[in-house]
Image (tube, rainbow, N blue to C red):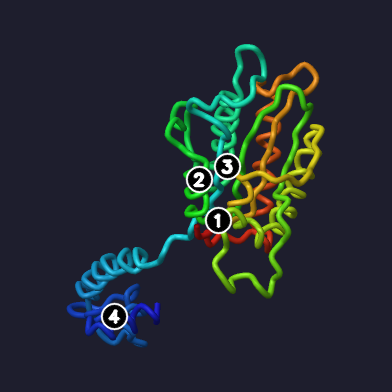
Amino acid sequence: MPWIRAFFLLLGIPTEECSGVFIAENAHRCGSPTLHRQKKCSKPASFAAAAVAALLLPAARAQTPAPQQPVILLDAAHGGPDTGARLTEKLPEREVTIAFANRLQSLLIVRGFKVVLTHTTPDDAANLTGDGRVELANRSGAMACITLHASGNAAGVHLFTSALPETEPALQGAKPVPWNEAQAPWVTRSLRLASELQAAISRSHTPVTSSRTWLAALDSLACPAVAIELGPLDDATAQDPAYQQRVAEAIAGALLFWRGHPNAVTGTGAVR
């Protein structure tokens, strides 16, 4: 190929050498238009050049940065000594939320997301404070922060976004954001994320409602953030694996769509 020959010449490496007897089938390789005499065409320099290229190309590929995976933050509510609500006499909320978070994590990973969990087992949260969860979320650069809850009596799925008024666009970034108002610049994005989640869960034939509330776990997050509460449905409790799987698949599908949404930007963090 001409571009390869030019590359080798630039490096001072000859591309071909001809000697000995010229034979008809090699005439085009040596660049001769006639067959007046016979020569042998050999290419020792070509093999050397190919070896150089083999060494150079992997190095060039190594310099190309890999695309960054989009991050989803999952916070299973409660944990450690904080058991949360009692869904049944023997079932604390913390057991359901962590099971739901781990199930959702698996679905998100196969869809190409990097998932950050605040904890992976109920006991992992023993020393995890509310501010610690928020700090981890705000440092993760997540395109969506999801807090997971469970209920023993409110049927279906309930979505909550912060009740904070949105910061005026002209004022965003003009001054440090108070810790308990970090969500204010993200309220509109959070509402749009909740809308995508609600539509996807509804398509899974699961009752779903959406509302706004004052919740410290949401108000301090500097990213598009939604709290999801999983309640019982018909004969299925919030712990039911099939029910959890159906809702988790709907959430994962909505987040995959959100990945390409213009409002799916990462958080910049809040100051205390």
Badge 2 is on which residue?
131
Describe residue 57's horizontal placement relative to residue 196 as left or right.
Answer: left
Badge 4 is on which residue?
8
* Relative depth, front residue between 50 and 144: 144
Amino acid type assigned to the residue bearing label 3 in the image: Leu
Q: Nearer the viewer, mark 4 or mark 3?
A: 3
Mark 2 and mark 3 lie on one chain; the one further toward the N terminus is 3
**Disc 2 to disc 1, how far (Cα)?**
9 Å
Give the image location of residue 159, x and y in percent: 73, 41
**Disc 1 to disc 4, how far (Cα)?**
60 Å
Mark 2 and mark 1 lie on one chain; the one further toward the N terminus is 2
Amino acid type assigned to the residue bearing label 1 in the image: Trp
Indicate the secondary structure of the residue bearing disc 4: helix
Callout 3–callout 1 Cβ contact below 8 Å = no
Binning the other alpha carbons within 10 Å of mark 3 as few (below 14), some (14 to 19) or many (20 upward) gives: many
Amino acid type assigned to the residue bearing label 4 in the image: Phe
**Disc 2 to disc 3, how far (Cα)?**
25 Å
* Relative depth, front residue between 215 and 39: 215
Amino acid type assigned to the residue bearing label 2 in the image: Asp
Badge 3 is on which residue?
108
Q: Which residue sits at x=67%, y=61%?
A: 263
Binning the other alpha carbons within 10 Å of mark 2 as few (below 14), some (14 to 19) or many (20 upward) gives: few
Badge 1 is on which residue?
179
